[in-house]
Image: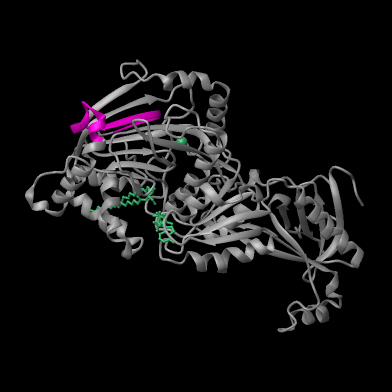
Amino acid sequence: MERPGRLLLLSELRVGNAACDVSLCRSLLTWKRRSSSGPVYHPFRPSVSHSVSVSEIISVREEEESRGRDDGSWKKIKEREGKDCRLAFTVLYVERRQQHRWRCAEVTFTCPEGALRQHWVGSIREQLAAIASRPKHLLVYINPCSGKRKGKRIYEEKVAPLFAQAGVATQVIVTERANYARDHLRTEAELKKFDGVVCVGGDGMFSEIIHGLIWRTQMDGGVDPDSPDEALLPGSLRIGIIPAGSTDCICFATVGANDPVTSALHVIVGDSQPMDVCSVHHNSTFLRYSVSLLGYGFYGDVLTDSERKRWLGPARYDLSGVKMFLTHHYYEGTVSYLPARGIKGTPRDAARCRSGCVVCQHNGEQLSEKPERYEVDEASDSENDSEWRTIRGKFLAINAASMSCACPRSPKGLSPAAHLADGTTDLILVRKCSRFDFLRHLLRHTSKDDQFDLTFVEVHRVRRFRFTPRYCQSNSDLDMRENGKHQLFSQICRDHPACGCAPAYSSWNCDGEILTHTAIDVRVHCQLIKLFARGIEEPMVFEDLPNPCAI
Ligand SMILES: CCCCCCCCCCCCC/C=C/[C@@H](O)[C@H](CO)NC(=O)CCCCCCCCCCCCCCC
Ligand SMILES: Nc1ncnc2c1ncn2[C@@H]1O[C@H](COP(=O)(O)OP(=O)(O)OP(=O)(O)O)[C@@H](O)[C@H]1O
Ligand SMILES: [Ca+2]
């Protein structure tokens, strides 16, 4: 019955009323209905074969006689099949649905005898236990105030039952205030006990988690977070996102859908997706980390305005978006950047970052093999260094997208060809233009047309950039001292649009949080963190299907 190394098990089992050939190869569970004339191939009665990779099996359970006793379903099966239900076992596995959604499907096999059932259940469990990447103990933070305030319910109803079925133990913490999760991770959490951290909420909640984890890792490793030139240490814990926020662009861009069940299943199967993180400094003061959007001008103003409308829930962004579009403020300043060299990919590529992305793999290897080359570039502080480029101008928006920033509002995102883990960010400069032109640019985020193919838009793939607003170019310290004053000034002008004077400063939108400074220094840290995700999967074509085992 066994051929070591290839075929572990091959039996005739029943699925419902049908006799099936069921096999367990090293990595594949396959069941194939037998044709009525026996196991022999019959060209006119093709039998459908189902295959599930063991890596996508969630769990296996032995059916108990008591199961379904209330509705008599087991009794009916027993009567129909004349079999003892104690001979049945059920396999729960990942099933792919439309639009990158995953669901938990199940199939029940009935064995001719109890010993065979034990053999099957034991073998599948043994294989599952051998998958080292699966988390066994997770620390879960729930933001009860995210999005439509449904985070707690989403976790309890959709996610916790799946974790329980998969045998994943959890410690669940419902946050009591903003930054509760960040502070808990920084100081209190016993991280050694866990294989990962899960956040239930939006991009802001994810941001709290990475701030807590990255800070803790640097402190433990003796790295000074205030130094913009120091390489940061990667953490060991993966992060899972159960989407319950207003934008959820990090979940959408790493999984392909904002769906709590899909995300929970990616956690259970132990997926791993590396991700770039930008550190943001003002002079030598650490401000924040960013993984998705750093936006000055339009997206900064949308965020500032939307914070006053939190009670509106996710719709606040659309309302503030329309308002800031009509307001049409532009801002003057200088952007300098270090172009990404020696890497694969450009922001105008047709190819997209997808599961198993070769660009991310290639660039990640390049950067880990030759970090000194980049360190030399980065350590150079001179604006005149030939590597640095400088652009002065009036901008409606300055956006740095470290990933596509795809989200339901814009399924292709701010920078459709950006990569999750290539060590770069796409710097998008939208110069002052008419409202009509800016609308054309914005609309292209929702269509197939190229949002960069406009004379007033430019995009650069960079490893590092700096921004200085016009009125503090001579002395960037001024920015710190003038901060209170400019915020007041901007506030007056925003609140009295009739006065006609445009504010001199916008704010930076850093993954949905407002930064306290306008002059910033941004550096990309390649693959600093890991998520329980695998990147967006390409739809399977016939040739991609796993080969059935050679029996
Ligand atoms: C005419 C339709 C144009 C639609 C253009 C849609 C572009 C949307 C691009 C979304 C990019 C999201 C990037 C992600 C940022 C997250 O780290 C952050 C935290 O969650 N979210 C936001 O800042 C939330 C940012 C939300 C921004 C919403 C902007 C809405 C713009 C509406 C403009 C309307 C013009 C109407 C003219 C009559
Ligand atoms: N218990 C809490 N009470 C109030 N605010 C909280 C609490 N826990 C976390 N927060 C804060 O709530 C803010 C918003 O959270 P979150 O990002 O989860 O939702 P969102 O803003 O609706 O979604 P998105 O960021 O995707 O647009 C975050 O800045 C987070 O720090
Ligand atoms: Ca990137």
Q: Is residue 420 magenta?
A: no
Vertical placement of 241 versus 441: above or below?
below
Q: Residue furthest left?
A: 499
Residue at horizontal 29 percent and vertical 48 percent from the top: 443
Please give the count of numbered marks on the rendered protein: 0
Q: Is residue 155 left or right of residue 484?
A: right
The span picked out in magenta is: 458-479
Q: How is the image coloured?
A: one colour
Residue at horizontal 54 percent and vertical 33 percent from the top: 222
Q: Is residue 316 left or right of residue 66?
A: left
The quadrant in which residue 362 appears is top right
Vertical placement of 149 versus 321: above or below?
below
| Residue 453 in sight | no
Vertical placement of 171 versus 227: above or below?
below
Residue 337: where, in percent of width, then height?
A: 34, 26
Residue at horizontal 25 percent and vertical 48 percent from the top: 301
Q: Is residue 116 left or right of residue 160?
A: right
Foreground residue, 375 or 60?
A: 375
Vertical placement of 313 versus 129: above or below?
below
Residue 512: where, in percent of width, then height?
A: 37, 49
Foreground residue, 397 or 411?
A: 397
Residue 5: where, in percent of width, then height?
A: 85, 42
Residue 122: where, in percent of width, then height?
A: 84, 57
| Residue 52 in sight | yes
The quadrant in which residue 221 appears is top right
Q: Is residue 465 magenta?
A: yes
Q: Is residue 128 left or right of residue 541?
A: right
Foreground residue, 108 or 253?
A: 253
